[in-house]
Image (cartoon, coloured by chain):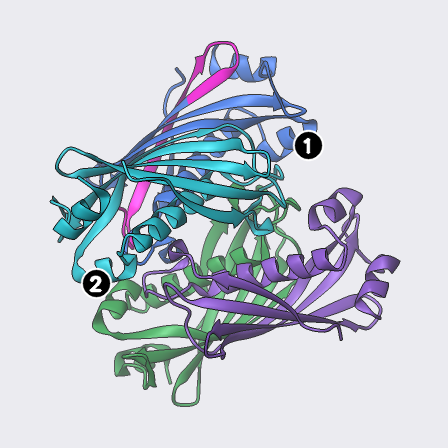
Chain colours: A blue, B cyan, C purple, D green
Amino acid sequence: MTPSFDIDMSVRDYELDLQGIVNNATYLNYFEHARHMCLQRLGFDFARMHESGVEPVVSEINVRYRRSLRSGDLFTVKTSITRDGVLRFVFDQHIVVQPHGEVAAEALVTAVFLSNGRPSRPPAAVVEAIGG
Amino acid sequence: MTPSFDIDMSVRDYELDLQGIVNNATYLNYFEHARHMCLQRLGFDFARMHESGVEPVVSEINVRYRRSLRSGDLFTVKTSITRDGVLRFVFDQHIVVQPHGEVAAEALVTAVFLSNGRPSRPPAAVVEAIGG
Amino acid sequence: MTPSFDIDMSVRDYELDLQGIVNNATYLNYFEHARHMCLQRLGFDFARMHESGVEPVVSEINVRYRRSLRSGDLFTVKTSITRDGVLRFVFDQHIVVQPHGEVAAEALVTAVFLSNGRPSRPPAAVVEAIGG
Amino acid sequence: MTPSFDIDMSVRDYELDLQGIVNNATYLNYFEHARHMCLQRLGFDFARMHESGVEPVVSEINVRYRRSLRSGDLFTVKTSITRDGVLRFVFDQHIVVQPHGEVAAEALVTAVFLSNGRPSRPPAAVVEAIGG
């Protein structure tokens, strides 16, 4: 497992729904943004991967929502990565509200690499960076 | 379990991401819309529930993505509901691509009712409609 | 000007914001979806245009919001197209709430075709379909 | 006119569309977030305004898109406010790409205050803060 990669974000009011809380789908936006920032810090650029034709796609997501995010909330998304078999990576992610550290949500996100639309071994550089 | 409630939808191009496929978070929008339509058919209005102060919130989501949705795809979201213990409901949902019926994604979505921010027994009418 | 192309849509609850009304940005999603459906009926496919390297992009948008859209609203997006000079098209769009026909919003959307990132003459087939 | 209020943001990959550029509707999200941050710095909280029953809504938006925003772009949203008559405020907003300062988009956004759904004079504190 990689060490945790942390990114600070804040709720934007347009992400709130009728209930005055961040909509459940928006947490997936936050998690995705954190994964891309994490890959970027490891040296990988999502847009360039797409152009190369070998790119990760999400195959499974499990999210537990523990505390609603509201207008003005500041939070940290924590991400670590492990390899799962030959083809899959699992991102372990948490949203932690600042400054008191309550967990707003936790997620396990499984990704596979596709090459021309078919599951394929991830690029060697990715495996090495994550620590297979 | 309630019988399956089906709703037909189609991909809108603004829901596509850089990869040319519907973004993973958008599936949660589809699933939510289908749940609200399902509740509506059972006689419940989400906006009115919110005003009454007793309303369902999502506590857990598990999604398996099986086939990417693309521009022009027509699909059906199938939803059925079961009760899980005293406090929770589980929505079993599938996205089925038309006309050939491939499953694009399947989800289990757990919801609890909150009353003034605390988990509470769901309204009796809801329990009765779903068949507790 | 082309005749008006109409498409029926309905508000989805995840499009509502804290104020209980459809967020102002979401109207642009509705208008875009209607433009793409309009182009499709004229024989053009947005995803395929993108692959061909010659594609329309929005250069200017003017929207007047007249009546808020709310949960449960059914509406029609009306779209007609005119050519504006050699390089630009203008889409004249209205959102009309059913069944009483109040105008929720009206928009003028200007689009230009880009070829390899530069403004270019629109494909002859497009000009002919719209009626230059 | 208030002095310019600046906020730094960056493109998140989920905001990109099929064309690999930020979708036109997402610019309205950026502009809205900057307006709320601006109001907050002036001492007003959007969520609390909503609860008080007197709140601003957008009545008109004019956006010129000058340069597409792409993956990895860092930008500043600049916002200043002027009063327009008794009932309206106009936000003059620019998105400026860093570090070279190209203008990606410019917008004029008109807002009115609603009290119980009807246009009303803005609260005196708001008028004073903006400098009527």
| Dominant secondary structure of the residues highlighted in magenta in the image | strand
Where does label 1 land, which residue? Answer: A51
Name the subunit of mark 1. Answer: A
Q: Is residue A50 above or below residue C67?
A: above
Does residue A75 appear left or right of residue B68 in this picture? Answer: left
* Residue farthest toward the right in the current orientation of the protein: C124
Q: Name the image quarter holding residue D132.
A: bottom left
What residue span does the magenta drawing correspond to? Answer: A68-90
Does residue C83 appear left or right of residue D99 in this picture? Answer: right
Quote the CA–CA distance across marks 1 and 2.
48 Å
Q: Amino acid at mark 2?
A: Glu
Towards the viewer: D69 or D3: D69
Callout 1 and callout 2 share a chain: no
Q: Which mark is residue B51?
A: 2
Residue density around tag 1, few if under 14, some if 14–19, many if 20 or more, within 10 Å? few
Q: Amino acid at mark 1?
A: Glu
Q: Which mark is residue C91?
A: none
Does residue C117 appear left or right of residue B97 in this picture? Answer: right
* SS type, badge 1: helix
Q: Which residue is drawn at the image coordinates 58% and 32% (left, top)?
A: A46
* Residue farthest toward the bottom in the current orientation of the protein: D86
- Residue B53: percent from the left, percent from the top? 16, 58
Name the subunit of mark 2. Answer: B
Q: Is residue A84 magenta?
A: yes
- Residue A26: percent from the left, percent from the top? 39, 45
Q: Is residue C1 magenta?
A: no
Q: Name the image quarter holding residue C82.
A: bottom right
Work out whether residue D51 can be spotted: yes
Contact between marks 1 and 2 (CB within 8 A): the answer is: no
